[in-house]
Image: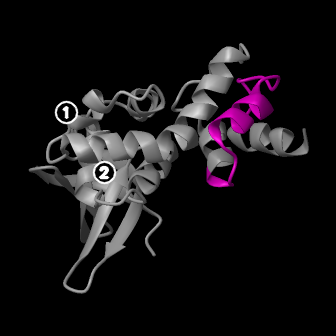
Amino acid sequence: MIAHVSGVVAEKFGNSVIVDVHDVGYEVQVAAGDFDSALLNEPVKFYTYHHIREQSQELFGFSSLAAKKLFELLITVQGVGPKAALSILSLGDSETVRNGIANGDSGFVAKASGVGKKIAERVVVDLSDKVGLAVTVAQASGVAHIPAGDEALEALMALGYNLNDATVALESIPKDLPTAERVTLALRG
């Protein structure tokens, strides 16, 4: 399994980025926001989901672990494959998509290319309690806002914490500490 790809952007086309990693080019399909932010001949790191089918293998890339985790939730919904999930993530950053699902906004999800009304409703029904509850609880309890790009938050979520638990664990830990130290303190807390 390929967990991440770090290298230099060699080419961009469609919704794919070719990442040159020590003279080996990996084609990584990305959401619109990640495609726009990937600049030719600049270093990039994508957390990847390696999708293996009988006829092909594809890499889907994400600039944050939170986006990758949301992608993995999306593809658990019946009728949502990797390309549809990537299309949904192209609607905005991962927090915008997460909040759209949490608020039951199937109209927002249906705006994604290749996602119809019924699939959008199924996404909202199946995932609102998995992504929405955490966001709603965090907002209702007055938990301090932690940016979506917070590496410590993403690390805790990769370790199995949900968004609310990770946010609460990091709430009292100073943001100016190194990521590893913040994660260690949160795990001890």
Hey, what amino acid is under mark 2? Ala
Label 2 neighbour load within 10 Å: few <14, some 14-19, many 20+: many
The relative height of residue 132 versus residue 160 in the rendered view (above or below) is: above
Seen from the viewer's position, the closer of residues 70 and 9 is: 70
Callouts 2 and 1 close, C-beta under 8 Å: no
Q: Quadrant of residue 42?
A: top left
Q: Is residue 179 visible?
A: yes
User: Residue lying furthest right in this view?
Assistant: 188
User: Residue lying furthest top in this view?
Assistant: 142
**In this picture, which residue range is highlighted in magenta?**
158-178
- Residue at 78% from the left image edge and 23% from the top image edge: 174
- Residue at 67% from the left image edge and 16% from the top image edge: 140
Q: Is residue 144 visible?
A: no
Q: Quadrant of residue 92?
A: top left
For label 1, the residue is 111
User: Residue lying furthest bottom in this view?
Assistant: 54
Seen from the viewer's position, the closer of residues 58 and 38 is: 58
Q: Quadrant of residue 23?
A: bottom left
Residue 57: horizontal and vertical position, in percent?
Answer: 26, 77
Q: Is residue 58 left or right of residue 45?
A: left
Which mark is first along the chain, 1 or 2? 2
Residue 143: horizontal and vertical position, in percent?
Answer: 71, 18
Please give the label number shown on residue 156: none
* Picture colour scheme: one colour
Label 1 neighbour load within 10 Å: few <14, some 14-19, many 20+: some
Hey, what amino acid is under mark 1? Lys
Seen from the viewer's position, the closer of residues 35 and 163 is: 163
For label 2, the residue is 85
Number of residue marks: 2
- Residue at 46% from the left image edge and 53% from the top image edge: 73
